[in-house]
Amino acid sequence: MAKTVDDFSLQNLLVDMDEDGITTVTLNRADKRNALNAETIEELIEVFSGLPRMGARAVVLRAEGTHFCAGLDLVEHHKEDRRPEEFMHVCLRWHEAFNKMEYGGVPVIAALKGAVVGGGLELASSAHIRVADQSTYFALPEGQRGLFTGGGATIRVADLVGKARMIDMMLTGRVYKQDEAISVGLAQYLVEDSEAKAYEIARAAATNPPLSNFAICSAISHMQNMSALDAAYAESVVAGIVNTQPASRGRLEAFANKTAARVRPE
Amino acid sequence: MAKTVDDFSLQNLLVDMDEDGITTVTLNRADKRNALNAETIEELIEVFSGLPRMGARAVVLRAEGTHFCAGLDLVEHHKEDRRPEEFMHVCLRWHEAFNKMEYGGVPVIAALKGAVVGGGLELASSAHIRVADQSTYFALPEGQRGLFTGGGATIRVADLVGKARMIDMMLTGRVYKQDEAISVGLAQYLVEDSEAKAYEIARAAATNPPLSNFAICSAISHMQNMSALDAAYAESVVAGIVNTQPASRGRLEAFANKTAARVRPE
Amino acid sequence: MAKTVDDFSLQNLLVDMDEDGITTVTLNRADKRNALNAETIEELIEVFSGLPRMGARAVVLRAEGTHFCAGLDLVEHHKEDRRPEEFMHVCLRWHEAFNKMEYGGVPVIAALKGAVVGGGLELASSAHIRVADQSTYFALPEGQRGLFTGGGATIRVADLVGKARMIDMMLTGRVYKQDEAISVGLAQYLVEDSEAKAYEIARAAATNPPLSNFAICSAISHMQNMSALDAAYAESVVAGIVNTQPASRGRLEAFANKTAARVRPE
Amino acid sequence: MAKTVDDFSLQNLLVDMDEDGITTVTLNRADKRNALNAETIEELIEVFSGLPRMGARAVVLRAEGTHFCAGLDLVEHHKEDRRPEEFMHVCLRWHEAFNKMEYGGVPVIAALKGAVVGGGLELASSAHIRVADQSTYFALPEGQRGLFTGGGATIRVADLVGKARMIDMMLTGRVYKQDEAISVGLAQYLVEDSEAKAYEIARAAATNPPLSNFAICSAISHMQNMSALDAAYAESVVAGIVNTQPASRGRLEAFANKTAARVRPE
Amino acid sequence: MAKTVDDFSLQNLLVDMDEDGITTVTLNRADKRNALNAETIEELIEVFSGLPRMGARAVVLRAEGTHFCAGLDLVEHHKEDRRPEEFMHVCLRWHEAFNKMEYGGVPVIAALKGAVVGGGLELASSAHIRVADQSTYFALPEGQRGLFTGGGATIRVADLVGKARMIDMMLTGRVYKQDEAISVGLAQYLVEDSEAKAYEIARAAATNPPLSNFAICSAISHMQNMSALDAAYAESVVAGIVNTQPASRGRLEAFANKTAARVRPE
Amino acid sequence: MAKTVDDFSLQNLLVDMDEDGITTVTLNRADKRNALNAETIEELIEVFSGLPRMGARAVVLRAEGTHFCAGLDLVEHHKEDRRPEEFMHVCLRWHEAFNKMEYGGVPVIAALKGAVVGGGLELASSAHIRVADQSTYFALPEGQRGLFTGGGATIRVADLVGKARMIDMMLTGRVYKQDEAISVGLAQYLVEDSEAKAYEIARAAATNPPLSNFAICSAISHMQNMSALDAAYAESVVAGIVNTQPASRGRLEAFANKTAARVRPE
C-alpha cells in the first residue's frame, strides 16, 4: 500500500501534498471533460483510502480544463455494454470511493467550474465544502440519457437540495447555476476564483486540530443516519473524546485568558 | 379492477389519458373548494393504484375552480363525529392514496392555484413536482382548527420546508405564497399559468424511458428512509437495472456519436 | 418535585408563568454572555421536565444582557480539566435538557439577540420557533476552539441548515446573520424586536388546543426519525386522537357554520 | 371492487367467510404444489386488500394437496424469460400481497404441511401465526437454483430465525423441520393436525375486540422498523386509542369485578 | 431532587442501597399483585432518574408477595375511565420510567416469581437481566382484555422473543414458563431462588468498572436502533473512552502479567 | 494492490486459494492464542478487500493452535497505553476489516475451536456461517477486564443471541459452549471436526452462482438495517438482477425438466 502520495500509482489523477498537509487532488482527463471512467474511480479509492493516514490536513479537489467533471464516462459505458450485475459492481466501486471521501475524516473542498453534472455532481457532493464560480452549472441529466444515478445522488444531492428539487432535476434535466445554485444549496460559496477560495478554506480548516476535523468530517454524516435520540448519545461520546484532547488545551487556555479571537459578525 | 381509465368508477375525480400516456387527474368538487371527503380519497386510491399499469407516462394533477384543494372536508368530519379509531382509519386511507402517488413510479405534476392548505398541501406534496401560480397560497391551519395533520404533512411538508418551518406553520397558521413559497421549497416552479407549465413538464418527463422514471419516482423516496450507507447499496442495484436497459442504448449511442443534446446552462 | 414555577430552585434561570400559561424562561448570566455551565443545564432539565405538567401553554425563552447565549462555559470547562467520560456525561445532561424542550409538547419560542453561538445555537435550535433581531448572529466556533459540538448541533443545526452548511460552519467558523440567516433556515423570523414578536407568537400558539400543540411539539420530531412509511402509520394514530378531541368540536362547528376565520394569504 | 368474498374473481384461490368472520383462504393449485404464479399473487393482493373491510375477524391460510406451497412458479419463470426490470416488478407485486397480509390488521394463521419452501416460506412468514405439522419442512433453495429471494425472506425469515441462520439456509439449502423448526422460530406451533389447530387459534383470536387485533396485526410490525425511543412514542398513542375503546369497557368491568378469567400457567 | 435513596418520597416502592452500591428496589403492593398504578410509575421515574447519580453499582428489582407484577392496574384504569389522550400520557410516563431503567447505565437485575404479565412483563423486560424461578410465568393478556400494550412490550418483548412469538402471545394469551420461557428468551436464568441469584449477579456485575457497566447498560441499546454501519462508528467511539479508562489499567496489567483470571468453560 | 493471494504481504495470516476458488485464511499466531494485534487487523483488511476480486468462491477462516482467537491483543493494548482517540481509530480499523468480511459478497465459513472470546467472537460473528466443535467456547469478558467491545459485538453478537443475552455475557462474563451455544445462536453447526465441516459447507456454497452468493452475502445484511417496507423495495431490485442472470438459466431449465434435485427433508 502507498505510504506517501508519491507512491500512488495514478493515470487519471494528480496528487500533491505540501508541507502543511494541504493536499491537492486533480482530475486530469480534461479532454474527456474529466468524465469518470472505471479506472479513475479505482484511483479515487486508492487516494482517499490512503490520504487520511498520510498526514493530509485538508484536500482541495480540483480539475484540469474548463469543466470540473461531466460524470460517468458514457462512451466507456456504451462500449462496455455491461450487464446489470456488472454495472451494479461499477456503482459499488463509486460508493467505495465517495464514502471514503465523505467519512474519511479529512476536510475535502471542491473547487468547481463549468460542468458539474451527473456523476460529476455526485463527486462534488461527496466533498464537505463546494466552492462554485460564475461558470459552474449543476445538472442531473441521467433521466434524459435513459439512466439513473449510481454514485450517491439519491442520497447526497437529495440531502443538499431536498428530495423534491432533486427529483425535478432528474425528471426534467433542470440546470442550476450561480445565485440560484447557492440558494438551493448545491454549493456553500460562489466566488470569482473557486480554486483560490478553496485553498483559503482548506488552509483555514487545517488550523483546527486534526481530531476536531476528523469528528466534523465523519461523525456528523453518521449522525444524520440515526434517530435523533440515538444520535444525541453518539454525539455525547464523540464530544467526550474531542473536547478533552490535549491539543485543545492551549486554545481553551487562550479563551480563558481572553487572548483567543472572539466570534463576531463581520 | 379497472383496465383503462374509462373503467374507473368516479364521482369526485375526472381522469383522462391521451395517446402519449399524458394523464390528467382533476379534482372535481369546486363548490367545496375541492375539499377531500372520504369518497374522494377512495377514488384517489383507485386511480393511483391503477394508472401505473395502464400506460400512464406522466400525470398532471389539477383542480376545477379557483382553489387547488382546501384539505380535509371539515363539514363531513364534523357531521360524522368520528371516534379516534374511526379517524385513524380515515388517515390510513389517505396514506394509501398518497403513498401510491409518491411511490407509484409515474411522475405526478401538480398544477396549483389558490388554496393549497391542510390536506390540500398534503395532496400536493405527494406529487413529484409542484407548479404554483401567483394566486397559490400554502398553509397548515390544523393547529388553529384544533386538529393535527393526518395525511403525511409531518413527513412530506417537513421534508419540503424543514421541520422547523413546518412546525411554525402548524403552530401559527403562517401562510406562504409566491417567491417566498418557492424559496422555502413548497413548490419548484412559480409561473403565470401553472397548468400550461405542468403539461410542459409532464410532456418533457414522459420522453424519458419509463424505467428511468419509475426509478426516479419510487427509488429516491425509499432511499431517503435508509441510512446513507445502505442506500448506497440499494442505489447501486437500481442503477444496475436501469442503466443497462435496452431502451437507453440508442440514447447512449447518440451520446457516443455526439448527436445527443448536451447539458448546457441557459 | 416542583409543583409550580415558584417551587423551582434556580440560580441561573428565571421562570415566570402568567395566568394564561404564557411562560417566560430567562437566561440570567448576562455577565458570562449567558454561557451554559453545568449548573444551568441542571436547571434547564428541572424547568423543562416540570413545565409540561404545570399548565404552561407556551414558553418564551429569552436572555438577560445583549447576547442570547455564548454556548458552553469554556472557562468552567477549562478549569474542570475533564476526562473524556466526564465530558460525555456533561453532554448527556445537555441532551436531557434539550430533548425535554423539543419533545416536551409545549411550544418554545426563542427570542434571540447578539451571540447565538456554539452551545447557544444548540439551545436555540431546541426551541420550536426562533425569532432573530438585527443584532443576532449564529456560529459554531467549536472546530477552531479544538472542540466538537456536544449538545445536539450535529442533529438540530444540521436539520435547520442542512448537513453541508453545518459542516462548513464547523470547519471554518462561518458566521450567519440577518437575511442570510433566515434564508438558510437558522430562524423563522427576523424582526426589530425579537422579544415582542416571540410573545406575540407564543400568545397565538397558546390559543390552539393544548392537545394539538402537544402533538405538534412532540410527534413531528419523532416522525422525522422514522421511515416515511412507518411515520405515516404513526401520524394516522396521532391524528386519530387529536382530531376527535372534544376541545375541537366548537372549532369545527364554527367552521361548518362558516363563522370560523378562513385561511387567506395576506 | 369486491364487496363480499363472493365478489372476488379468483382462479387459484378459494375464499370463504363464516358468520363469525372466520375466513378461509385456500391455495388451490395442488398439482403445482401450490407454486405461486403471477396470477395467484394478483389474487392474493385482491383478497388481502379486501378482507379487512369485509368483516373478516381472522383468516386461516391453508392449502389443497400435500404441500403448503413450493414457492415461485419456476416453470412460469423459466418460460417467461424475464428481463431484470420485469422480474423486479413481479417482486413488487409479491410485496404488495404480503405487506397487505402482515400490516392489514386482521390475524392470519397459516396451517402448514409438506413443503414450505422458497416463496412458500415467504408467504407463510407473512402470516402472524404459523402452525406446522409433522410433515412440514422449511427451506430456501434459492441459492442452489441460482436465484435470490424476492418476496420478503430477507426480512421476514431473517426476523424469524435470525440473519445468520437465514443466510445458512440460503447458502446451503439447509432444511428445517419438526422440533428444530419450532426451536429456531419458523413456526410457533407443532401439532398433529395443523388445520384444526389453526382454526382453534383463529376462533380464539377472533374473540378479542377487532381494534385490539388491528393494533396487534399492524402496529407491532411498524414499531420494529423504528428506533426504540420513537417506537415508544408511537406505542403510547396506539394504546391511547385501543385501551379506551368502548368495546373493552365490559371486559374491564368484569376484571374489576373479578369475574374475568385470570391469567394462569397451565 | 433526592440526593440519597433516603430522600426519595415513595409509597409503592421500597429502595435500599448497601455500602457497595448494591441497590434493592422492591415493588410493595403485594395485595394488588404489584399492579402498576399511576403513582407507582411516577415513583419508578423518580428512583431510576436518581439512582445513576447516587452511587448505585447494580440494582436488584424484586417484589413483595408471590407475584412479581400483574401489570397495569386495571381497576384504577377502569375507574378513571380515561380519554385516549389521557391514556396516551399515562403510557408516556411508563416509557419515561422504563427508558430510565434500560438506558440509565446501571445494571438492573429482575428477580422474578409468579405472574410477570402484561405491564409486569414490560417492567421486567426493561431490566438488563431477568432471573426466573419455577413459579414464574409470562403472558401478555392485553388482547383478551380488549387492550394493547403501552409500556414497551411491542419493542422489548418483541426483542426478547421475536416479533412472531410476541404477536402470538398477544393474539392468544399464550403463557410461557420454566424451560420454554428460557428457551424463547424471556429470561436469561432459571433457578430455584431467583432473588439469591439476582443478588449474586448484581454483586458480580458491580465488580466491573462503573464506566464499563455504563457503556454496557446504555450504549448497546442505542446501537440496536442504528444501521449496523453507523453503529460500528458509534461503538468505536464508546470503546475509545471505555478501553482507555484509568480504572482498567490495573486489570490490563494483571492480564499482561498473567495474574488475571482467564476465561474458561466450566 | 495485490492481484493474487500470493501478492499479499502477510505476517500473521496465511492465505491459500485452490483451483475452485475455495480459499483458506488462517490465523497464525498460535502462541498468542491468535490474539488480534493491530498488524493482524491491517492484514485482514488487505485480504478481505482483495479476495472478492480475485476469484474467491468461498472462504474458510481457521486458526493454528488449539484456540480460534482470544480477541484483542491485551498485552499490546496495555503496552501501547493508548489515548481515547487512538483506540477509537484502532476500532475503526477493526470495523473496516469485519465489514469487508460481512458485506464483501463471498461466503465466509469460520471453523471454530477452543476460545472464541472477546474480539475473537467479533471476528467469528463477521463470518456468514460458524461451525463449532466440542472444544469451542464463547464469551465476552470485556466487562470484567474493564473494557467494552470495539469490533462489532454490540451489533453482531447482539444479532446472533439477542441483546439481552449479549448484555448478560458482558456484565457477567458468562461462557456458552456446545448445545447451549447452538441453541442461543452463537453457531449454526456443532460437529466433531469443525474444519472438515467448514470445507464441506464452503464447497457446497461455492456451487451456487457467484452472483447469488454475492447477494446472499451482502444484500441480506444491508436489508436488516432498513425499515421492512423499504427493504422490500430493495429486495425486489436485487432479485430482479439475480433471478434473471444467464448463469441460472441452465438450473431453471433443469428444474422445468424435472432433472433438478428437489428439496426434501432428510
Image (cartoon, coloured by chain):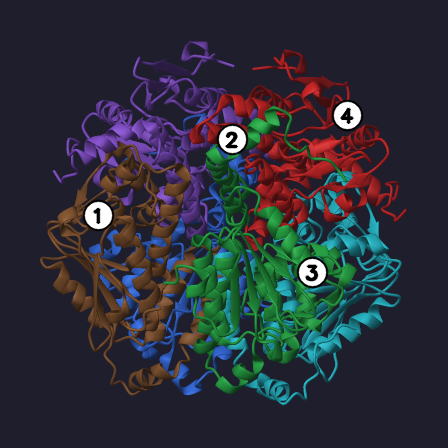
Chain colours: A brown, B purple, C blue, D red, E cyan, F green
- In the picture of the structure, the residue carrying the numbered disc 4 is D66
Whether marks 1 and 3 lie on the same chain:
no
Disc 1 and disc 3 in contact, CB within 8 angstroms: no
Q: Which residue is mark 2?
A: F249
Instruction: Give residue F194's mark.
Output: 3
Residue nearest the observer in this picture, B178 or F51: F51
Q: Residue E238 location, x and y as percent?
A: 51, 71
Dot 4 and dot 1 within a common chain: no
Q: CA distance from mark 3 to mark 4?
A: 37 Å
Marks 2 and 4: same chain?
no
Q: Judging from the image, what secondary structure is the residue with disc 4 in?
A: loop
Residue type indicated by callout 1: Ala
Q: Is residue C243 left or right of residue C135?
A: right
Q: Numbered disc 3: what chain?
A: F
Q: CA distance from mark 3 to mark 2?
A: 34 Å
Helix, strand or loop at label 2? It is helix
Q: Amino acid at mark 2?
A: Arg
In primary-sequence order, the first of circles 3 and 2 is 3
Foreground: disc 1 or disc 3: 3
Q: Nearer the viewer, residue C237 or E167?
A: E167
The residue pinned by badge 1 equals A35
Say which quarter of the image contains residue F193: bottom right
